[in-house]
Image (cartoon, coloured by chain):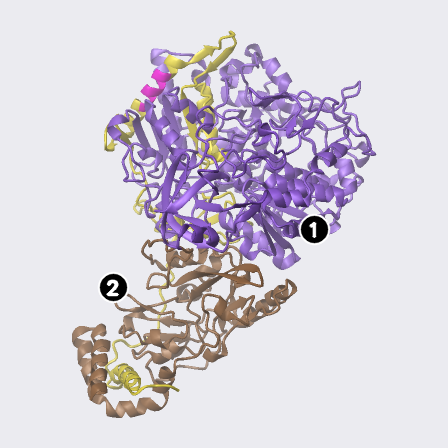
Amino acid sequence: MNVTRRQFFRVCAAGLGGSSIAMMGFSPTAALAEVRTFKLARATETRNTCPYCSVSCGLLIYSTGDKSKNSQAEIIHIEGDPDNPVNRGSLCPKGAGLRDMVQSPNRLKWPEVREAGSTEWKKISWNEAIDRITKHMKADRDANFMTQNKDGVTVNRWPTTGFLASSAACNEAGYLSVKVLRSLGMTTLDTQARI
Amino acid sequence: MTNHWVDIKNADLVLVMGGNPAEAHPVGFKWVIEAKKNRKAKLVVVDPRFNRTASVADFYAPLRSGSDIAFLGGVINYLLSNDKIHHDYVKAYTNAGFLIDDGFKFEDGIFSGYNEEKRSYDRSTWKYQLDKDGFAKVDDTWQDPRCVYQLMKAHYARYTPDMVAKVCGTPKDAFLKVCEYIAETAAPNKTMTNLYALGWTEHSVGSQNIRCMAIIQLLLGNMGMAGGGINALRGHANVQGITDFCLYAQNLPGYLSAPTDADVNRQAYLDKRTPKPLRPGQMNFPQNFPKWHTSLMKAWYGDAANKDNDFAYEYLPKLGGASDVLATFEAMYHGKMNGFFCQGFNPLGSVANKRKVSDGLSRLKYLVVIDPLATDTSEFWKPHGEFNEVDPAKIQTEVFRLPSTLFAEQTGSFTNSGRVIQWHWKAADGPGEAKDDTEIMAALFLKLKEMYAKDGGAFPEPLQKLTWAYRQPAKPAPEELLMEINGKALADVTDPKDPTKVLAKAGDQLGTFAHLRDDGTTSCGNWIYCGSWSQAGNNTAKRDPADPSGLGQTPNWGYAWPVNRRILYNRASCDLSGKPWDPKRTVLKWTGEKWGGNDVPDMRPDAKPEENVMPFIMNPEGVGRLFSRELMADGPMPEHYEPFETPLDANPMHPKNPKATSNPAARVYKGDMEAFGKAKDFPYVATTYRLTEHFHYWTKHSKLNAIVQPEQFVEIGEELAKEKGIAAGDRVKVRSNRGFIKAVAVVTKRIKAFDVDGKKVHTVGIPIHYGFKGVTKPGFITNTLTPAVGDANTQTPEYKAFLVNIEKA
Amino acid sequence: MALQSLDIKQRSATTTPTPQARQTVEIAKLIDVSSCIGCKACTVACMEWNDIREEVGTCSGVYDNPVNLSENAWTTMRFSEVEQNGKLEWLIRKDGCMHCSDPGCLKSCPAPGAIVQYANGIVDFHQENCIGCGYCVTGCPFNVPRISKTDSKAYKCTFCSDRIAVNQAPACAKACPTGAIQFGSKADMKDYAAKRIADLNERGFDKAGLYDPEGVGGTHVMYVLHHADKPSLYAGLPENPGISPLVSLWKGAAKPLATAALGLVALGSLFHYVMKGPNEVSKETEKEVEEEDKA
């Protein structure tokens, strides 16, 4: 063993610091070992699906409260659903980090508008947002709706406003979107499926 | 996926090419590891980079990005010239013996019918020879020089191992080793699965990359088998579902091709889409198209779609031309669009050539971003230092940003890559005033409907007549919507063979698309989802993980489309007599009376083997296609073409024909053609990709993911780094002909220079994921660099192979 | 027999014997490096479960983020590109506490009850009792514990003792997509490892083996390595880890000697501890040792 004199004293002194405290009956605590309490004990568990890739892993989302009227659920933890036949409880680094996506500081909380030429966002109400957007839509649709093409074939399309649809939306939302958009005559329609 | 995630565990060989599942789909990749652990399966990876999938592979072969068809054509040649094919399967279940029109030719890289000016083919010679009854002529001996087998053999004879090495830069011995692995699965009881993703689709020859694998899997007899198939690993959680609902211009929900200007009336529209069988006795399932389409119109327009008004055919907009994202941004760039919606989509990050996208958005009157997150797109007008240099004063676009909820705050269903639809439940409210996408769509629709009712305007009928029988019109419930999608009987549906027998009572939810009718007595929002919410209730919410067959089929977990079938083309897992090729992995078998086994048969359940109803029921010929007739824009057999930005002077397969350098049928807009860079200025092949730690442009907003991969980087090999004096950790500038990005250099042994046609070719690897909004370190948008040219069939942009230069920043 | 029993086997700087009557199962995590894809699900799951967040760092030219263990990063992946016989391998090792049977950290710790070893094999730090002296860092043969810059307490992997206590697998093991991290009794983990090693042998890795080093009495986090003959290939995994000679010395001959001779030092330390808190103790001790040294 290669120990210098200086090292020898350092070892003795440091170890002694603690040992001697105990020897004198002045322990900082009773030195009981206790693990952190299991934090999910009475959390509410909800079954969900990871929104990232198409493996669609099953999730258990844990939130505070018991859905009683006066407590607002806060998501405190997300882990894999062991029953799901594909992920069997496991998750990748994206899925394992979902809590920070749900609680990202960059989540949008209210409608906003950036006026033409402006340098900033302005918070607006949902009513104002829907009013202003639908006015744009109607004005554009009425001005550019094509009833017939140059050959006289009825085409009933609105080509000048487009829509890129979410590939992260539920089937039900996707269905409602396509139903509404086609009823408006929209043909400039695409989704993330392509890229 | 023709198969599904868990089924990967049944494979003997997993070939990963055109994908990187360990990084992009780590949990799905679990089943590759399970196959290795429990079946002694081998994993072979072919990729330009030694990636994290390769790190656990049994064998890795490098290939130059953009040369996949040369490699796979070489595999086809190997299988044919060494006779490593599953003969009985190929004979019975493919079009190998079908005779092709005498006019079909392939000369110096170009198929017959090419029109150079239009950059497209007249495909009229790419077809079968037909007999007097309209059926394809077949030579079962494969001796006729015009049969598919002979044409294919001649076509791929050019793809020798030496040619593969020359084009791909893959060492010849490595290529042959991969061929040996693949060829072993020609045995009837051996299967290979192929896992691919955007590494194949994001090329100007993307669809043909996949066609190559379809040919290989048919030759090996691996389609329909447990542990086989062609498995597209899709991107977003519900990209499969959103594709099934066809939120894109060309199709209506359920892949029903949308009407175009050429479809002047309903009858003409239906006739064109209702094929006649090309062989006697085949199911030719698309013959049911009128039932699917009529039921959709009933779901959308109810009583307003009836026999007297051609089932409201005129309410459907006719497609005037291309309207994929590239076409859309082309139109926007030229000021032809006024409004644009981005729902959960960040095109500034996702679409090729950021400058063009940004200029396009600047020319709109209004942009509406519906998203849970503050996306880069929503702030395209806002200066973010060198990462987004713009002048807001010059941008007159009015931009709205609407907060939507995330998965955890919604109830509804997602469809995974294996076509399994799974229901999920809401756990908490969204933050602030965030609303569900359905509520936002309802709010827009109801307001417009009110405005049109009050003030009139262009063609208001479809809006006014659209069915909207939701209990809370402003808040359609996901349960109501899935029931509508599934469809119901509007009158009693009876058995065509026995009209006294009622299959579904009026008002009932339908149990199967076999009960759909074309006379207006059924409604269905998406025929392939019919059965998902039957009279038994919500089948997508089933949660029984039992796996009685041990194959991982879990038939009572969620609901797989179509009709809860887990493996497509499963009839092909048996020989002609109905015996499984591999009894240890029985998917289906003929019981003597009907088809039974461990899956829902992809076959008429009582079709006796001797009736010779072939397994590929969606094809009018009933068999798998080695020769794809006129169905692809760029040729009935895949051919290697160089990427639009190639490091080479010519296509080594057609050095003397400049027309055949790059895909002759790919659409290229003026302006985009000029924006292509040349190898003398941009000598290195760039390829973009995902990292394990991030998902697309979302997780840059999640701190946990920012921690594990905090900053944009590019990867280069040690040799190039040395040449350029770049050390790991240096900041570098990467330029293409469209712009530049700066990032940190990762210098690695995992990327090696290729020897291609005597020329040294370096690869620069560029992850996506970063941008100017997020909790990661601010970065440049990778798609600043990429070219706006797409695959000839799908218009998926060529993100995987383009040219750049690199220098120390 | 339950896996979760958290009966105490030993405590740092405590001479009172612990109850020994109950026999509980020894647990272990097995990290099969040959199935690991370096995805970092474990790293993220660890931070998520334990409510810690490392700072968002920078890319230093490699994939290793977090770049090192810290009080907020109790595990991290270490990537090594190794070329042998013309074949490239990307060896990826999950680094973190090995939960030694003979824990150098516990042996060297002077603060009573700051480090405990449970009967199931988990070595856990109790920050309430930690005086921040940093001796656990010196005592650890794997360079694992880290002293927090904000609260001067030592932190490391807890083996998710809060999950184990209710019979749940550690967060990292549960998350692992490829099953490269397995959790169970140590005996079962060794059996599982034997199967993996046989598979690796068949695939041409003749030297595949289990890493369960004897120098620390075996560990409760074990590795299956393709090259068990060369652990150092895996980002410097020690070939023959053992407890530092300094710690052995202190625990052996030096302790009674020092107890007698250096009472004053101890008293000084105590006063500093009471008056100024833990950090001062080690600094003061250091200073006095140095003075002693000069003398």
In the image, which lettered chain appears purple?
B
Residue designated by label 1:
B180
Residue B788 visible (yes or no): yes
Image label count: 2
Name the element at disc 1.
Answer: helix
Q: Is residue B500 above or below residue B563?
A: above
Residue A169: quadrant of the picture: top left
Give coordinates of residue C250: x percent, y percent: 34, 86
Q: Chain of mark 2?
A: C
Tell us which disc is closer to us: 1 or 2.
1
- Image position of B762 (left or right of C150): right
Residue type at numbered disc 1 = Glu
Q: Chain of mark 1?
A: B
Q: Is residue C142 above or below residue A190?
A: below
Task: Point out which mark residue A14 bears.
Answer: none
- Image position of B484 (left or right of B218): left
Residue B568 visible (yes or no): no
Give coordinates of residue C28: x percent, y percent: 49, 69
Q: Quadrant of the N terminus of chain B?
A: top right
Residue B90 falls inside the magenta stretch = no
Q: Which residues are magenta?
A: A133-140
Q: How far separated are the C-alphas under marks 1 and 2?
A: 59 Å
Name the element at disc 2.
Answer: loop
Secondary structure predominantly adopted by residues drawn in magenta: helix
Which residue is nearer to you in this view: C201 or C96? C201
Residue designated by label 2:
C150
- Chain A tint in image: yellow
Residue type at numbered disc 2 = Thr
In the image, which lettered chain appears brown?
C
- The local crowd at label 2, few if under 14, some if 14 to 19, many if 20 or more residues have their Cα within 10 Å, is few
Q: Is residue A144 above or below residue B618?
A: above
